[in-house]
Image (tube, rainbow, N blue to C red):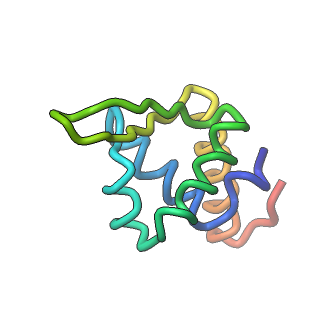
Amino acid sequence: MSEVVHQRHRLGILTVAREVDQVEFSYLRDTLDLTAGNLSRHLAVLEESGLVAIEKGYAGRRPRTWVRITPRGRTALDEELRLLRRLLDGGAPA
């Protein structure tokens, strides 16, 4: 699972999503400075791994896509952050 989370943009997606109940696609796109196509691909990988859930709907008449981190995603993110902290503290990754 670490290979999925470790990628910089996926780590960013999970980190942003963890801070809120759900995050809108356009916010992630703009915050992470990704194209819609790149973000879609990263989200597909995360969704296939069970790390995020994607919900499509409408805000008024405008279509929207919301992303929510799953419990499995929280666990994977916590593990990745633990490994990164260990590296920063001068220890070897486990």
**Residue drawn at point x = 63 percent, y = 29 percent:** 72
Front residue (pair 90, 14): 14
| Residue displayed at 55% across by 63% down | 37
Looking at the image, residue 44 lies above or below residue 68: below
Count of marks overlaid on the render: 0
In the image, what residue occupies the spot 61% across and 67% down? 8
Residue 34 screen position, x and y as percent: 47, 70
Up-down: is 51 above or below 92?
above
Question: Image quadrant of residue 22?
Answer: top left
Q: Is residue 75 above or below residue 43?
A: above
Question: Left or right: where does residue 72 sit relative to residue 55?
Answer: right
Tell me the residue at 38%/38% (across/down). 66
Where is residue 41 shown, x and y percent of the image? 63, 56
Picture coordinates of residue 65 (x, y %)? 39, 40
Residue 29 image point, x, y percent = 40, 62
- Which residue lies most toward the top here? 71
